[in-house]
Image (cartoon, helix red, strand yellow):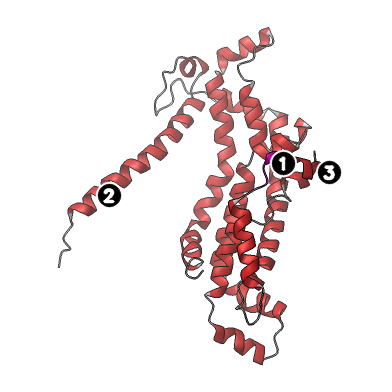
Amino acid sequence: MRQKIGMFDVVNTILLCVIGLMGILPFVHMIAVSFSSGNMSAQNAVGLIPKEFSLEAYKEALSDTAMLRSVAFSLLRVLLGTVITMVLTILTAYPVSLDKHNFPGRKFYVVFMVITMLFTGGLIPAYILISRLGMVNSLWAIVIPGAIPVFNVIVLLNFFRGIPNEVREAALLDGVSDFGMLTRIYLPLAVPCLITLTMFCVIGHWNAWFDGLIYLRDNTMYPLQTYLHVKLDSLNDIKSLQDVEQMLLVSDRGLMYAYVSLSCIPVLAVFPLLSRYIKGGLTIGSVKG
């Protein structure tokens, strides 16, 4: 029997297609400009298809040793920051996921964490604290302050609370410790949620730029996004005749879009592989409060 398609389904499909195009077309335009000649991109004559195909913008971007150094620093930040965040998130979420009989102070800690998510001390107090701890101009200044995202903790603790109590009681009867309970029972069951939260950590660290601009004084230590922010601001500066000659081959817009396109490659490569876990991880982790 053929299923009847209602007007709502038609309108909803059209609306979603329009929203999808609004998201994808600017990216396609960016790619087209980055692969066009400097003359075409400077004239703003490029639409969704490259004109006078050229790789000069990417050659210029990939020959920038400072950018390559910032990529390495960003990868180090992502690796170290994700590991620290996930370990601390797990160790925080597990105890507060227990009921009040196993952890009497659970509610106080949950409320305290939620308050810190809604209210912050502000940028200046944060900088003073980081400065007095001696972490300014170091990797720790952009890794430690956000090491425990409260949203991630709430998602994971709700996932843990969704695990039946019978599983915990059976493990306790077998003499399993809390650490064994966490590593042998809770974490294997929470793999979809953990992958989702790991993706959040990776994308968050990779895309972060403002903290690097505030806490890092040495521009040779800038993460990629911070470096791109500073670099793109200086593209219009003409300092020598060589800069003028270079602009004839590569326009500022083309070079800017080449930088941005290269910075998107890691996320675009990893996200499709793990996207199927994200919906399930968030859905399951939002069942209980």
Q: Amino acid at mark 2?
A: Thr
Question: Residue at position x 70%, y 85% from top?
Answer: 176
Q: CA distance from mark 3 to mark 2?
A: 54 Å
| Image spot of residue 53 (x, y percent) | 48, 23
Q: Percent position (x, y) of residue 95? A: 66, 73
Q: Identify the residue under disc 2.
A: 13
Mark 1 vs mark 3, foreground winner is 3
Disc 1 to disc 3, C-alpha distance = 28 Å
Q: Is residue 187 visible?
A: yes
At x 54%, y 77%, the residue is 163
| Residue 174 placement, left or right of 219 | left
Disc with the residue nearer the chain's start (3 vs 2): 2
Q: Is residue 134 above or below residue 154?
A: above
User: Within 10 Å of the Cα at label 3, are there few (<14), some (14-19), or many (20+) other Cα atoms?
Assistant: few
Mark 3 residue type: Arg
Element type at marker 1? helix
Secondary structure mostly seen in the magenta stretch? helix
- The residue tagged 3 is 132
| Residue 224 spot, x, y in % from top left | 66, 37
Q: Is tag 1's residue or tag 3's residue first in the polypeptide sequence?
A: 1
Circle 3: element type: helix
Of discs 3 and 2, which sits in the foreground?
3
Helix, strand or loop under label 2: helix
| Amino acid bearing label 1 | Ala
The image quadrant of residue 24 is top left
Residue 198 versus residue 149: which sits nearer the camera?
Answer: 149
Crowding near the residue tagged with mark 1, few <14, some 14–19, many ≥20 C-alpha atoms within 10 Å: some
- Span colored in magenta: 121-125
In this rendering, does residue 35 appear at all?
no
Q: Is residue 78 magenta?
A: no
